[in-house]
Amino acid sequence: MRAINSSSTASLVMRWTSTARQLRVVLKQWRRLAGISSPQDLCILYSNRAACYLKEGNSTDCIQDCTKALNLQPYSLKPLLRRAMAYELLERYRNAYVDYKTVLQIDTGVQAAHDSVHRITRMLIEQDGMVWREKLPEIPVVPLSVQQEHWEKPVSMEQARARAARVAQDEVRRKEARVSLLKQEGNDLIKRGHFHDAMHKYTECIAIKPDDCALYTNRAISLLKLSRFQEAKQDCDAALLLEPTNKKAFYRRALAHKGLQDYLSASSDLQEVLELDPNVREAEAELLVVTGLLRQSLMDDRFSKKLVCLPKCVQIQFSDLFFCHVCSASSNVMDLHPGDPPPFHAEGGDRLRNHKV
């Protein structure tokens, strides 16, 4: 009989057989009729039959065929991966872990192996505690020549995209881990009162992840403690661009405005905090302080040449004086001279009469 063309063996086998029993028959016939002795071809047959066993849920026979395939072709990727899956199904987690780690030495782009390693690691920690690594079988070291040979093989477009996606995911995870570490270090430095060092930690975080609102509000704390109020305000502005309803950003910007002696803006930000959450006691207490500073400031400046129009249509009563927060679109600016009475006095109050608040 004529021998089967070994170059098309794998595709023919998978096309002609749908069960492990049929594939076993094909394997016996092929070896008897064709006299196949190529380790590579036999490795493919065993690996493909193992895939059928795995699909049927026959993990034991799958492991046996994968082991035969690996004896013929050590460090063959598919038999390693299939054997690892079979071990995992049998809850032989240490063996599965070793095979998955071996797979990743050959190709770091195998997402299934990465996911399984993370999952099995948690299981082994629960099972063996912190000494789980000591109980693992030895993980073989894959020769560099095998790794290089694998990477030099032509890859399909799908494989190339998968590898690129894996590299991108690894980079994201690396950055996330770095940011998490630096952020924690910054938080610890804040607790110890090392505000300058904490500021630099948050700056490093922002350089890696500039779209994280919490990093700006955290750095704002350091800047406030260092009395760098303008920079703290800028960080809060950046945070509010990312999250327009962030209470921490409004509150810390209010503190920055207070440090800059812009009590009107501080009052406005504190009111924003209380509108978002009326239960923020710190904002309530700070608003009382800022209100007192604003009252004093306005009383000191009430005979200045121009009465500044305030940014919101809100009327605030300070003792026996009423000051109208006129909207920013208004052009109601009065020229005052020394000796003039206060512009909005509680007694009479006729200057407020025609102004809708």
Image: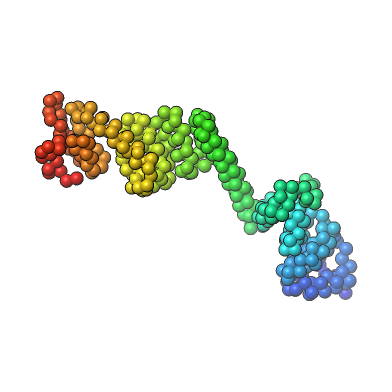
The answer to which quarter of the image holds residue 32 is bottom right
Residue 96 image point, x, y percent = 74, 57
Residue displayed at 41% across by 41% down: 249
Give the camera-side residue of 326 and 70. 326
Residue 243 image point, x, y percent = 42, 46
Query: In the rendered view of the protein, which quadrant contains the C terminus?
Result: top left
Give the camera-side residue of 162 and 271. 271
- Residue 175 in view of the camera: no
Give the camera-side residue of 29 and 109. 109
Residue displayed at 80% across by 51% down: 137
Residue 144 image point, x, y percent = 78, 45
Residue 314 image point, x, y percent = 23, 43
Residue displayed at 45% across by 35% down: 221
Name the image colouring.
rainbow
The answer to which quarter of the image holds residue 334 is top left
- Residue 92 in view of the camera: yes
Mark count: 0
Q: Is 234 left, or right, of 161 in this rendering? A: left
Q: Is 295 left, or right, of 196 in this rendering? A: left
Query: In the rendered view of the protein, which quadrant contains the N terminus?
Result: bottom right
Is residue 275 placed above or below 183 in the rendered structure? below
Residue displayed at 60% across by 47% down: 173
